[in-house]
């Protein structure tokens, strides 16, 4: 990546605003298609302690970018998904385990820590000569018929034929384009943390369904570390956050019935309210929105970035090799509304990978993800069919 001073009013075909996972991957993808791309964002702040489970088609994009060899050592395969009824009901659903091998896959997806993934994207981007990294915040965008003018915090300006808003949930690009949002929330919050454990996870992710929400352990690389998203009532989340790390470790171990042996939480957990947001339009004029600028989900169901990568692929395929039309944003929005075509393999995974609520396309976000926490069983698994008849959505829609 060329972190350099842009020339006065330098013109780029595409300006990506925001260098989180969504913006960085979008910038790389468009640069690989031969577009001149500016990637605008301030220097990264504190390290992102979250992890992201990427599924089937998202991994295809990572492979197409030539990144898989470098990403694989950072990632843990999700080979099996186990669902346990963790309620105290008298009659409980039997435990079911879905194996990726049942649907002909090595893994349902891979869990990747965000911080090294972002660092890798930054390094990889250095190899793209058509990508210019501009280390600054955007302060203003003006839209003209032929171009957009982007003003930076230090007084510099550039122009672009297309602006990709990847500047997160509070997107300034979205606001400048006059695109409104819809917000919703659930009476729950999620405690998010990483932990080490004595017994190997063997690449199995386990989800306990509790009275107040799912408790989901997801493997991290190396066998003896996992990430956790624990959905509870907000007051219970706050109570957990106030515990010492020793007491929190014990609470996690007990909740998991010690299935991974002794647990050690070594960094204070984060908490996220279970809320969502969707832009009322995903594009307009010379702007499109991707990532959390377009749609933000509660941290369950591995939806956010997977959906964003599909947005990126949709934008790339819609633009093809043509120059950017002045109504590209509206065309992109229309495509998102219709739902873009999905390869057969993706649809099969959507049916079979119930436990992570596989994303259903950008149009799903527009329709409001009432299926969050919805569980659909693998077509091939009798176990799963039996389980479905007993199971209720973990999170009320
Ligand atoms: C706990 C948790 C777990 C998750 N797990 C998963 C998962 O398993 N699978 C999955 O698919 N998704 C998951 N997600 C969602 C996923 O993390 C996000 O979709 C993903 O990080 C993409 O975010 P983003 O790049 O859109 O936004 P952000 O990461 O918020 O990045 C926004 C960028 O915009 C920049 N920016 C902001 N304002 C400006 C400005 N004015 N000028 C220039 N730049 C600006 C910021 O500096 C930053 O670089 C999870 C989310 C959470 C909270």
Image: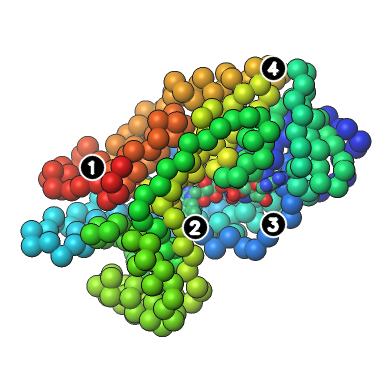
In the image, is the residue at mark 3 within 8 Å of ligand 1 by its beta carbon?
yes
Q: Quadrant of the C terminus?
A: top left
Mark number, residue 326: 4
Counting other residues with Cα less than 10 Å from the Cα at mark 3, is it few (<14), some (14-19), or many (20 or more)? few
Q: Is residue 118 above or below residue 265?
A: above
Locate residue 268, reporting x and y percent.
Answer: 50, 73
Q: Are marks 2 and 1 in contact (CB under 8 Å)?
A: no
Q: Earlier in the sequence, mark 4 or mark 2?
A: 2
The residue carrying mark 1 is 377
Residue shown at 19%/59% (left/top)? 85
Locate residue 95, reporting x and y percent.
Answer: 17, 57
- Is 214 positioned to the left or the right of 24 in the image? left
Q: Are marks 4 and 2 in contact (CB under 8 Å)?
A: no
Locate residue 317, reporting x and y percent.
Answer: 57, 24
Q: Are marks 2 and 3 in contact (CB under 8 Å)?
A: no
Mark number, residue 44: 3
Circle 4: element type: loop
Gap between marks 1 and 4, in whole Å?
43 Å
Mark number, residue 51: 2
Q: Are marks 3 and 1 in contact (CB under 8 Å)?
A: no
Q: Earlier in the sequence, mark 3 or mark 1?
A: 3
User: Mark 3 against mark 1, which lies toward the viewer?
Assistant: 3
Q: Earlier in the sequence, mark 1 or mark 4?
A: 4
Q: Residue furthest right?
A: 8
Residue 12 in view here: no
């Amino acid at each position: 990546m060329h972190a350099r001073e842009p020339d006065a009013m330098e013109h780029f075909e595409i300006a990506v605003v925001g260098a989180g996972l969504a913006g960085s991957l979008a910038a790389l993808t468009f640069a690989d298609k031969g577009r001149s791309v500016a990637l605008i964002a301030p220097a990264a702040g504190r390290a992102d302690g979250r992890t992201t489970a990427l599924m089937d088609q998202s991994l295809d994009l990572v492979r197409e970018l030539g990144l898989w060899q470098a990403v694989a050592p950072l990632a843990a395969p999700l080979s099996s998904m186990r669902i346990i009824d963790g309620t105290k009901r008298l009659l409980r659903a039997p435990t079911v385990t879905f194996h990726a091998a049942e649907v002909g896959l090595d893994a349902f997806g891979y869990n990747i820590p965000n911080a090294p993934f972002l660092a890798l994207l930054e390094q990889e981007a250095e190899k793209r000569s058509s990508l210019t990294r501009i280390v600054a915040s955007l302060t203003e965008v003006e839209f003209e018929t032929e171009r957009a003018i982007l003003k930076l915090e230090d007084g510099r300006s550039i122009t672009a034929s297309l602006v990709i808003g990847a500047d997160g949930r509070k997107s300034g690009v979205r606001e400048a384009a006059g695109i409104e949002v819809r917000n919703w929330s659930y009476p729950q919050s999620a405690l998010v943390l990483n932990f080490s454990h004595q017994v190997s996870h063997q690449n199995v992710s386990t989800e306990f369904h509790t009275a107040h929400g799912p408790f989901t352990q997801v493997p991290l690389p190396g066998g003896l570390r996992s990430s956790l998203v624990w959905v509870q009532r907000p007051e219970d989340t706050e109570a957990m956050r106030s515990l010492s790390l020793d007491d929190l470790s014990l609470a996690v171990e007990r909740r998991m019935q010690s299935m991974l042996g002794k647990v050690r939480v070594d960094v204070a957990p984060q908490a996220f309210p279970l809320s969502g947001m969707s832009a009322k339009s995903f594009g307009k004029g010379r702007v499109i929105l991707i990532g959390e600028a377009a749609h933000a989900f509660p941290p369950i169901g591995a939806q956010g970035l997977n959906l964003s990568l599909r947005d990126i692929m949709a934008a790339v395929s819609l633009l093809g090799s043509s120059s950017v039309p002045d109504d590209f944003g509206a065309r992109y929005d229309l495509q998102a509304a219709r739902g873009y075509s999905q390869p057969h393999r993706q649809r099969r995974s959507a049916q079979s990978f119930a436990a992570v609520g596989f994303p259903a396309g950008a149009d799903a976000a527009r329709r409001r993800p009432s299926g969050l926490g919805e569980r659909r069983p693998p077509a091939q698994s009798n176990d799963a069919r039996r389980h479905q008849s007993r199971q209720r959505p973990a999170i009320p829609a």
